[in-house]
Image (cartoon, rainbow, N blue to C red):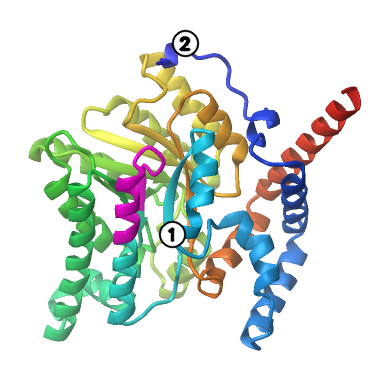
Amino acid sequence: MKTASQHHLLSFDDTSVAFAHQSNKKLYKTYLIFAMMNQNWLVKIGTFFIKLILKLGLPVKFLIKNTLFSQFCGGESIERCQVAIENLAKAKVGTILDYSVEGEDNEKDFDKTAQEVERTIIKAAQQSADIPFSVFKVSGVGSVEILEKVQEDRESLSNEEMSAFERVRSRVDTLCKRASKLNVRIFLDAEETWIQDVIDELSYEMMKKYNVGGKTIVYNTYQLYRWESLENLTNACENASKENYKVGAKLVRGAYIEKERRRAAELEYKSPIHLTKEETDDDFDKAVHYAINELDILSICLGTHNEESCLLCIKLMQEKGISHNDSRIWFAQLLGMSDNISYNLANEGYNVAKYVPYGPIEAVMPYLFRRAEENSSIAGQSSREFLLVKKERERRRQLSVIN
């Protein structure tokens, strides 16, 4: 077993490790996808026309399935994700099955989503070495409108609305209870600030029930682009220490920056988002420092594509002599992105998992559009992906010439 004190300089530029799992044919396809995503104008036009074509019912599923879908999703069902699970496992990278169907807004669909998430928990229990976490969004198992009303003024809810919220709580509890019984860690994903307080409340309620006896089952998600999040994390740990339970924390930067700032401006309240990326980066790194010093009470997963934050965590682990595969520390990236981080970390023995979205192609299109748009808008992200793939193709070309 490696300890971080045995650490040598880890490079996220080692493309031979990052893309060892991709054949030349697959690497070329990846190259073409990121070359297109590297062009912001092309992403916008492509997204518009794909939405239009889907609306008209024209047959483009095959094209989507063999490009964006195959790059960023594991399959259309849990069963069809098995190949992706096995391929990741070969490189000692775990899978987080993420049912990425969006837009449900009725009780029948909420129940269906909860049942599907429960299936991912059972799958994780059956393949615990390959699937270290399950995940769900509270808005997938309950009405955003109800969650927002609860957060704004719980006392004003009608009996019918309170019953609807109790059904949300029941679904969340059922999933966390199932995860606890099967010893599967489960993330409650972060969402918009106007419903996040309720999600936090549910997360801590579940932690008190199921993160006991030395186990950390339930993880809340902290978006560090919010100026309140670091304090929320430290308060959560202080409360857990007093009440004798563990805290699970997935640390992310945040995913709703434009929406959050726009709403704050429209409704004339203080933006919950840091003014600069530097402030976000600083809070994220402070959270990593804090977590490494609080591992007696806190388990973390760094959900990030930021190389510097990953290297910081490794450095802190090294300084404290924490083993690479300490079960309280995980790294996670999205399938199809930042393979240079995921595979190089795994190659050094760190705990790494990929978010593997799945679901019917039409239903996960909002997720895929967001992936494409985020990649083209994040400063340097798609360029970084593109340049790394390009570098590996060139390395293989030179190697074939030598041989």
Residue nearer the viewer, 327 or 269: 327
Q: Which mark is residue 248?
A: none
Q: Is residue 155 left or right of residue 151?
A: left
**Mark linked to residue 6:** 2
* Residue 320: x %, y % from top left: 36, 15
Q: Name the residue at 50% across, 73% down.
A: 363
**Mark 2 surroundings: few (<14), some (14-19) or many (≥20) residues within 10 A:** few
Earlier in the chain: of badge 2 and badge 1, it is 2
- The residue at 62%/86% (across/down) is 55
Vertical placement of residue 192 versus 341, above or below: below
Q: Residue furthest left?
A: 243
Q: What is the spatial separation of the Cα atoms under label 2 and label 1, in whole angstroms? A: 38 Å
- Name the amino acid, label 1: Ile
Name the quarter where the C terminus is drawn. top right
Q: Which residues are magenta?
A: 118-134
Q: Residue furthest top?
A: 6
Q: Which mark is residue 78?
A: 1
Q: Residues within 10 Å of mark 1 (few under 14, many from 20)?
A: some
Judge whether residue 275 can be spotted in this image: no
Location of residue 8 (image quadrant): top right
Quadrant in the picture for the N terminus: top left
Identify whether 368 is placed above or below 209: below
- Quarter of the image for residue 399 reads top right
Residue 131 in the magenta stretch? The answer is yes
Residue 227 in sight here:
yes
| Residue 241: quadrant of the picture | top left
Q: Position of residue 66 (x, y in %)?
A: 68, 62
Q: Secondary structure at mark 2?
A: helix
Does the magenta segment cover residue 355? no
Q: Where is 287 relative to 82, above or below?
A: above
Image x and y of residue 233, in percent: 28, 43
* Element class at badge 1: loop
